[in-house]
Image (cartoon, grey):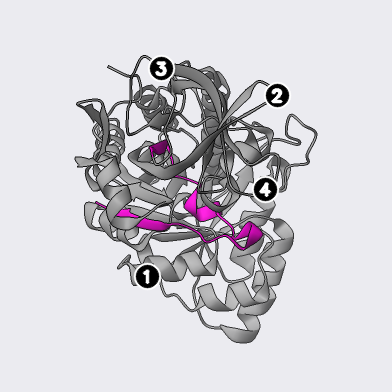
Amino acid sequence: MNWWQNEFATVRRNKLFLAGRKAEDLARTYGTPLYVYGKKAILARYRFVAEALARTTPLETWVCYAAKANSHPGILALLRKAGARLDAVSPNEVEAALEAGFPPGRILFTGTSVSLDDLGRVFTVEGLTLNVDAAEQLEIMGRFRRKAFPKKKIRLSVRWNPGIGSGFAPGVVTAGARSSDGTPIKFGVEEKKVAGVFGRARELGFVPVGLHQHLGSGWVREDYPAVLAAVEKMVRKAAELERKGFALEFLDFGGGFGPRYAEDQALFPVERYFRAIARAVAKARFGIKAVAVEPGKFLVGDSAALLLRTEYVKESFGNLFACVNGGTFNTVPRPPIYHAFHEIVNASRVAGPRRARLTVAGNLCETGDVFGQDRLMPVPASGDILAVLGAGAYCRSMASTFNLRDIPREILI
């Protein structure tokens, strides 16, 4: 069996099937490029996370879907019905969550560089919790509240930066002082300022209820020691806040753990991580009622694929190209932006004797418009369907109309 096969992507009679449907038939019916999302696979991932977290602790456990990974209305509604909460990073995501039926009390808004327009839109949502990203942001929020919502009790949590970041690429590390490429990290309240922000929030009439952290995206097994260290720092900081008289309702450990994108990738030990959180929280003897995590790509990443049609195979300077009818920036931007790996399968002939190393090249006027370089697969014929796997997270949500190319259609089956 191929390493990438799961309940969403399977092989029958040398053809790729997605959510039980032949990929070629889906391409023929709906056209290409085409995003295909699998309901059963998404629900299976959610239930795994929810049940694994709940087994670790007698406290309430909140699984907050990170909507920035994929905000398809059907996916939001599916997860809401399954019991998920939602992490939103823009007012539009808040509104999408409300439209999908999420009660405001199950939405956490985590904004950065928050504008007055942003505040005006989210302050009106009764029961929503806002995550403060900066002491300076809090002062602006306080002035705005006094002017526009003087009597309203607004729930706040504080996103702190524990000084430890982790992620699969420099651009997705969201904690620490700087990323590995030297980029200063813009997120979160510095450790020495956290208690002051809680105190000032209370002075300004807000209701501080939680502490939040997010280290980065796409953790693998090697990230576990750093992530564990951040858990322990989080719990110590929360204990300090409690000693200072702040009664916390919840601790939110953020997201970060991802699905398996490549054969040689060792999965992050999610259940072990949850047990470590539960042990640390229990040892601290908190008065909190809930522990939260924010999975995004883990729930939807490998529950989807992008289908492309091969227009022709080109040979140039000894390089072989499968030229397809979609561009990375319009469909799967992760490879050119983050140098991320996505498995690519010839859906029309998954295995076969005539194999070669070829580069899957998109239709954009951009050298970096490459889905995968030097991939070994059966050489496609004109009209063959290629499937870019792991296309459920940060693909449609990051897609653009570069070169005035259309963003593909999406189906949830």
Say above or below: 17 vs 201.
above
x%, y% of residue 357? Answer: 53, 19
Which residue type does callout 3 highlight? Arg
Q: CA distance from mark 2 to mark 4?
A: 45 Å
Q: Nearer the viewer, mark 1 or mark 3?
A: 3
Camera sees residue 253: no
Q: Earlier in the sequence, mark 2 or mark 1?
A: 1
Q: Is residue 374 left or right of residue 104?
A: right
> Is the Cβ of the residue at disc 4 closer than 8 Å to that at disc 3?
no
Question: Which stretch did the figure color magenta?
Answer: 384-413
Say the numbered circle drawn on residue 354: 3
Q: CA distance from mark 4 to mark 1?
A: 26 Å
Crowd rating for badge 1 (residues with CA inside 10 Å; few <14, some 14–19, many 20+): some
Q: Is residue 162 left or right of residue 34?
A: right
The residue beneath circle 2 is 317
Callout 3 secondary element: loop
The residue beneath circle 4 is 187
Q: Earlier in the sequence, mark 2 or mark 4?
A: 4
Q: Residue furthest right?
A: 182
Which residue type does callout 1 highlight? Leu
Which residue type does callout 2 highlight? Phe
Camera sees residue 341: yes
Q: Nearer the viewer, residue 400 or 280?
A: 400
Q: Is residue 412 magenta?
A: yes
